[in-house]
Amino acid sequence: MKLRSLLSLRADATNLTEIPVHSLLDVVNIPTDARATPWALIARRFGYALLLIIAVAFVAYLDRDGYSEPLTFIDALYYSAVTLSTTGYGDITPVAQTARLINIFLITPARVAFLMLLVGTTLSVLTEDSRKTLQIQQWRNSVRNHTIVIGYGTKGRSAIDALIAGGAAPSSIVVIDPDPAALTVAEKRGLITVHGNGTKSDVLRVAAVSRARSVIVAPSSDDTAVLITLSVREMAPSAMIVASVREGENQHLLMQSGADSVVVSSETAGRLLGIATVTPPVVEMMEDLLSPDEGFAVAERQIADDEVGANPRHLADIVLGVVRSGELYRIDSPEAETVEPGDRLLYVRMNGATTQPG
């Protein structure tokens, strides 16, 4: 199901509850514990039912002389099937006392179990949509301060890797992408997914962009990134927007569209290529700093009380800069000579080491 049915909603609608939940079953996916698909569930329980029929047939065949006619094994299977399914044609009936006792204490409970298998399977399949609907409704009512990643390509996946390595919970990340295959990969990582085009306001509204803490714009083309950034900034004035562009000449367009930070992928890659030609170890160190899972990484933390008034160059950590009132001051700037209350430090952290709170 696409989002065509949602396009009729008013463009100024910002309340997620205005969108019917049942319209989102094929749009929003909230990963849960691994569950069998309805068809797999049916197949498994059908197999259980067949095994039960065969087991009852063996019991009936063992007492084949206690029925209205001597039973072959085929007759026993037939009797088991019509009895457990409560069809009961009456052409084969138990007449001996032992056969009737077996029917009372074995075949009748087996009949009940058989019906429970069939009815339970039907109820499980019918209630699956209701369960998903309730789950989506609960998520829509509670989602706050999450991160939205628009585009699950190489850049989007790498951004999510960094977020998770930095401590973000997968359940706090929402991925928007029009490619179902990409969303399937994201779902396996425990990410919440929204199927649709990030340039459309209804898709952004479903992802609760107005309540998001940050939005990462990582589509495959620069013009799409500009359109997405414009829409996100209009719907989420206070969200942090980080966008990626291929060409540096488009950077100002992203900034004018409302992006707080823009990463130029082609220029960054070009600089690394040039450095690698002259000093390859520098590139290795840069890759180490950018890799979230091993070696060193650039991190940010709140200053400790005993660090107020100190020179950041003399701290135990290797400090690269000071963030004060939202502004970054490099370690060599006059403003960064002394740590002030409320400052945050950009420093080199060894992955796996315990960081100070904040």
Image: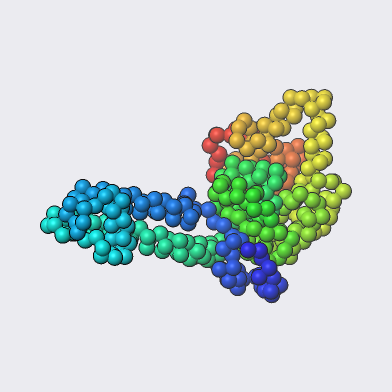
Residue at image location 65% in from the left, 35% down from the top: 291
As drawn, 357 above or below 28: above
Is residue 344 shown to the viewer in this render?
Answer: no
Please state the total of marks drawn on the protein image: 0
Residue at image location 60% in from the left, 55% down from the top: 193
Q: Closest to the observer: 178 or 341?
A: 178
Residue at image location 66% in from the left, 65% down from the top: 3
Residue at image location 72% in from the left, 63% down from the top: 200
Q: Closest to the observer: 350 or 319?
A: 350
Is residue 253 shown to the viewer in this render?
Answer: yes
In the rendered image, the quadrant that contains the N terminus is bottom right
Farthest right residue in view: 249
Give the image location of residue 281, x and y in percent: 74, 24
Colour option used: rainbow
Give the image location of residue 154, x and y in percent: 70, 43
Farthest front residue in view: 69
Horizontal side of residue 338 vs 350, given as left or right: right
Q: Closest to the observer: 10 or 263?
A: 10
Give the image location of residue 337, x and y in percent: 71, 39
As drawn, 85 above or below 18: above
Give the image location of residue 115, x and y in percent: 33, 61
Q: Quadrant of residue 5?
A: bottom right
